[in-house]
Image (cartoon, grey):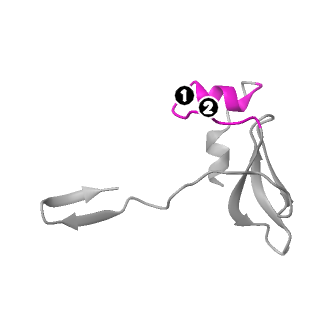
């Protein structure tokens, strides 16, 4: 799961570590993934940035969302190629 690549187990507060790095305004809270738990309908996988754990929690709870995209996409324009 991609969430595991964001967690640095050598630090206590994952949100603070991410804010010092390539991200900003990461909250010490949980963030949803789009991945549901196999063989279950209610839970989905998420990461607890205050603790650095990837867990599954009921989708009925409020949480943050972290927008991600799949692979690199390329769109051709009149002026050439634009990557986004």
Residue 75 position within the rendered picture, expressed as x and y whole percent measured from the top left = 27, 65
Residue that label 1 marks: 21
Residue 22 position within the rendered picture, expressed as x and y whole percent measured from the top left = 51, 32
Q: Residues within 10 Å of mark 2 (few under 14, many from 20)?
A: some
User: Residue 34, located in which quarter of the rendered image?
Assistant: bottom right
Nearest the eye: 72 or 25: 25
Above or below — where is 68 with respect to 14?
Answer: below
Residue 32 position within the rendered picture, expressed as x and y whole percent measured from the top left = 72, 55
Secondary structure under the numbered disc 2 in the rendered image: helix
For the N terminus, the image quarter is: bottom right
Residue 25 forms part of the magenta stretch: yes
Image check: 83 left or right of 53? left
Q: CA distance from mark 2 to mark 1?
A: 5 Å
Mark number for residue 41? none
Is the residue under label 1 in contact with that under label 2 (CB below 8 Å)?
yes
Residue 44 position within the rendered picture, expressed as x and y whole percent measured from the top left = 78, 63
User: Residue 21, located in which quarter of the rendered image?
Assistant: top right
Residue 44 forms part of the magenta stretch: no
Secondary structure under the numbered disc 1 in the rendered image: loop
Span of residues in magenta:
12-28
User: Residue 24, located in which quarter of the rendered image?
Assistant: top right
Per the picture, the main secondary structure of the magenta-coloured stretch is loop
Above or below — where is 31 with respect to 22?
Answer: below
Image check: 35 left or right of 18? right
Residue that label 2 marks: 18
């Amino acid at each position: 799961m991609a969430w595991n690549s964001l967690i640095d187990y050598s630090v206590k507060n994952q949100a603070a570590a991410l804010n010092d790095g390539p991200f900003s305004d990461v909250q010490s809270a949980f963030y949803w993934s789009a991945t549901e738990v196999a063989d279950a309908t209610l839970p989905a996988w998420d990461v607890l940035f205050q603790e650095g754990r990837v867990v599954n929690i009921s989708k009925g709870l409020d949480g943050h969302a972290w927008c991600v995209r799949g692979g690199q996409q390329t769109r051709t324009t009149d002026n050439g190629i634009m990557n986004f």
